[in-house]
Image (cartoon, rainbow, N blue to C red):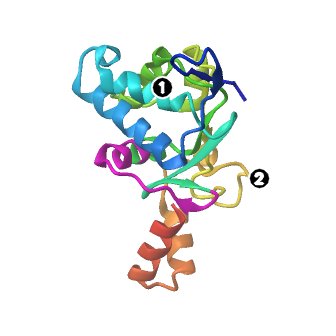
Amino acid sequence: MRSTVIDEPGSGAARPMPPAPPDAVVDALGVAWSTFTLYEHPQRVEAFRRAVSILGKCPAYPWRIEVSAEGFTLAGEPVAHRREATLRLAQRIFALGTAALEFGFPPAAEELLTLFGLLAAPEPPDEPGAALERLGVRSIALLHRELFGSGSGDGAGKPWYLTYDGNPEPFIHKLLSEGEGDPTAVAVEFVAEY
């Protein structure tokens, strides 16, 4: 874990900077995302710079936070957020097939902007985690989740998107059989799982 220090005026001493609580880190992500979407040069905006500073105080490094359609979670528990932008960011990341966001060390503003640029791209990359690495981002990782389990049975355990042949019928039949034909049960199960 990186040791950040605060100089106390007049004391000549420095003390370790306390880590930010998870909800502050999550809100910092939301603030940074919001300024990215609103300003042409977010790095010039004080709120963005403060958010990057807070992201430099994660509880530990590496620090991983899970992503779901309902927001960010830590150890399966929802992390409270105060900003709608935080939820929108989590949903955007989740929609890319990402299970978690991991900070290996404090991110630089440029790396955060690269992540956001990737998230805002009109055509998302097939493998966002690998794309982020190719763009030179080292402090932030997008950890992939397997969507919808494995394929229709002939994919030898490969994720469905590697065996998908363009026909959604086997997947739909599987959902219907698991939901015993009840559309509401299928919808509830689908939302709960994915």
Q: Quadrant of residue 37?
A: top left
Left or right of residue 162, residue 45 in this image: left
Three-letter code, disc 2: Ala
- The region drawn magenta spans 75-90
Q: Considering only order in the chain, which callout, 1 or 2, is on the residue closer to the N terminus?
A: 1
**Residue 98, quarter of the rendered image:** top right
Q: Position of residue 78 (x, y in %)?
A: 50, 60
Q: Residue at x 55, y 23 (%)?
A: 107
> Would you say residue 86 sits in the magenta stretch?
yes
Of circles 2 and 1, the one toward us is: 1
Q: Decide if residue 127 is in sight here.
A: no
Where residue 3 sits: x, y (%)? 69, 24
Write down the residue under mark 1. Answer: 53
Say if 177 sits above or below 7 in the image.
below
Q: Amino acid at mark 1?
A: Ser
The x, y position of residue 64, in whole percent, is 63, 42
Q: Vertically, is 98 above or below 151? A: above
| Residue lying at 48% horizontally and 49% vertically, measured from the top left | 23
Res 19 visible: yes
* Disc 2: CA contacts within 10 A as few (<14), some (14-19) or many (>=20): few
Q: Do labels 2 and 1 touch, CB within 8 Å?
A: no
Q: Position of residue 51 (x, y in %)?
A: 41, 30
Q: Is residue 129 above or below residue 83?
A: above
Q: Give me the C-alpha separation between circle 2 and circle 1.
A: 45 Å
Q: Is residue 179 above or below residue 107?
A: below
Q: In the depicted view, which residue is nearer to us: 146 or 18? A: 18
Q: How many marks?
A: 2
* Label 2 sits on residue: 156
Which SS class for mark 2? loop
Find numbered disc 1 in the image and state the secondary structure of the residue it sits on.
helix
Q: Nearer the viewer, residue 97 or 90?
A: 90
Which image quarter is the N terminus in?
top right
